[in-house]
Amino acid sequence: MTAAALFALLELYRLHFRDEPNRMATGLGLGLTSLLLASLQWPTLVSERTVVLLTVIAVLLSRLFATREMKHGLADAAVLIFGVLYIGLAMGHLLLTRALAGGEFLIFFLVIVTWAGDTGAYYAGIRLGRRKLAPVISPNKTVEGLIGGLLLATLVAVGARFWFLPSFSLADCLAAGLLLTVAGTLGDLAESVLKRSAGVKDSGALIPAHGGMLDRLDSLLFAAPAFYYYVTLVKGTAA
């Protein structure tokens, strides 16, 4: 999970520093994200609040030694901090979910239902798509695709309940299918905004025909926190 997060973060930073690579800034962001993930995995090591504060201070101080023109300082600092929070905090919720009772099954449920929503939306959109969901941001996404994603995600959630997660009721499966598909779609659209602003189609070329790691994780970046808080606040599951 940590390796995937760092690959995704590296791609995000490359979108910003594509014209002038900045190894020092990228290395700082990767190191701070690793520390944030470690604080979520081992909370007694250092608190995440301390890491967030350290991130802000370290990034701002790093600008004092930057070799890029001063006019880039605000944007560079904002992107570095944003990357740590966007990738680190979001992916960190997978670690928090894993720490819950039966966490390994919850992670499996989260991943297959989220990706079922993506898959259902893709094929339903190709075959039935008519009405654009977000034409400016992602012209290929349709309302019909979203509905197809909801249906497949819910079906997979029900199947997972009978397969390995009996603690989830049918109502939980319905809620999870809806929540994870909507959250995943929003995560996908949010990443599309970043790519469009950078003028690229994919975040990278790590996975042939699929784009980069960030392209593969964009849905999970929103779905993972949503699922964690559903499980802990609605179902009341504790570590």
Image (cartoon, rainbow, N blue to C red):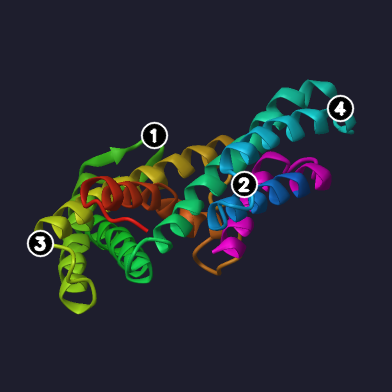
**Are the residues tagged 3 and 4 within 8 Å (C-beta)?**
no
Q: Which residue is mark 2?
A: 12
Q: Which residue is mark 1?
A: 136
Quadrant into which the C terminus falls: bottom left
Q: CA distance from mark 2 to mark 4?
A: 23 Å
SS category of the residue bearing label 2: helix
Residue 20 falls in image quadrant: top right
| Res. 212 visible in picture | no
Q: In the image shown, does 131 or 9 lie closer to the viewer? A: 9
Residue at position x 76%, y 28% in the image: 60
SS category of the residue bearing label 1: loop
Residue 46 x/y as whole percent: 63, 47
**At label 4, which amino acid type do we have?**
Leu
First in residue order: circle 1 vs circle 2: 2
As for residue 20 lying within the magenta part, the answer is yes
Quadrant into which the N terminus falls: bottom right
Question: In the picture shown, does residue 141 fall above or below 57?
Answer: below
Q: Which residue is mark 3?
A: 170
**At label 1, which amino acid type do we have?**
Val
**At label 2, which amino acid type do we have?**
Leu
First in residue order: circle 1 vs circle 3: 1
Furthest residue to the bottom? 163
Q: Which residue is mark 4?
A: 64
